[in-house]
Image: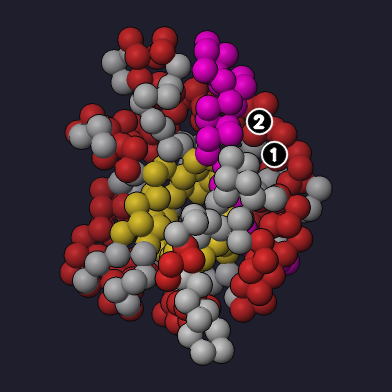
Amino acid sequence: MNHSQITENIRKKQSLLCVGLDTDINKIPKHLLKEADPVFEFNKALIDATKEFAVAYKLNTAFYEAQGINGWISLDKTLAYIPKDIFTIADAKRGDIGNTSEQYARTFFYTYPFDSVTVAPYMGKDSVSPFLQFDGKWAIVLGLTSNVGSADFQLLNCGTEFLFNKVLQKVASWGTINNTMFVVGATQSQRLKEIRHLLPEHFFLIPGVGAQGGDLDSVCRNTLNKNAGILINASRNIIYAGNDAYFAEAAANEAYKLQTEMKRYL
């Protein structure tokens, strides 16, 4: 999916919403556990309930990998079920030496045909470049994350700027606005405007709104550009909004509320 297709879908749905299908089998409604594939049945119901409001779905692969082969089967079935006009993200945070990254890229662009994969840039250009060689596919590179531990390295002072600034600028030079996005945490509100000034045209994937305490108004005011330019991820507050037979309806209500708020900024 290319840049203009993502933007067109945002405009059409008046939404920036990325729903995180970070499905923990220990948290899904108990009545689903009798199903042959409870994780897929949970995801399927959530997709049906939220696809009207979502422009992207993000699957955190850790929650699937932890279930072994059955988890990968659930992931594959979930990916196939997502409507083709909705952007898909493999939240895998891969990044290794070049030939290993090539195999990771093949995994998430061919074997499991996601539109994008999250990438850790710590090992440098040869660990990121293999993800940038596929037409219509995206590397979503960790920039400034929303977790407390981000301060350990990302906010290290490197003379006149922080380390995360150097990472953002360096990685941006390896790709283009058509194949490179950046993860920028919503809880880093004091940095959002600075990062958008640094990268005026790139798409950002922004986690942390909702359960992690990020503020939607601050995110939109400081990061939206002429093409929208952001995907705002919400996971727990949508997918675990309910825990009974009506969990999908509860998820739909939460997704609708977020989309309604987002619409005001578009």
- The answer to whether any part of residue 215 appears in the image is yes
Is 16 colored magenta in this rendering? no
Q: Answer few, some or many: residues within 10 Å of disc 1's Cα (few below 14, many 20 plus, some between 14 and 19).
A: many
**Which residue occupies 64% across, 34% down?**
255
Whether residue 230 sits left or right of residue 178 in the image: it is: right
Of the pair 131 and 122, the residue shown nearer to us: 122
What amino acid is at disc 2?
Glu
The magenta stretch is 225-251
- Above or below residue 89? Residue 65 is above
Provide the secondary structure element on which disc 1 rests: helix
Q: CA distance from mark 1 to mark 2?
A: 6 Å
Neighbours of disc 2 within 10 Å: few (<14), some (14-19), many (20+): many
Indicate the quadrant where residue 68 lies.
top left
Foreground residue among 188 and 169: 188
Circles 1 and 2 in contact, beta carbons < 8 Å:
yes
| 164 lies above or below 3 | below
Q: Is residue 172 visible?
A: no
Image coords of residue 22 (percent x, y):
43, 38
In the rendering, at what x and y percent does residue 183 appear? Answer: 51, 61
Give coordinates of residue 176: x percent, y percent: 49, 75
Residue 229 in the image, given as x and y percentages of width and height: 64, 62
> Which residue is at a point 69% across and 50% down the rendered structure image?
215
- Determine which of the numbered discs, if any, sits on residue 258 in the image: 1
The residue wearing badge 2 is 254
Residue occupying the point 44% across, 28% down:
43
- For numbered disc 2, what is the local secondary structure? helix
Q: Is residue 23 left or right of residue 191?
A: left
Residue type indicated by callout 1: Leu
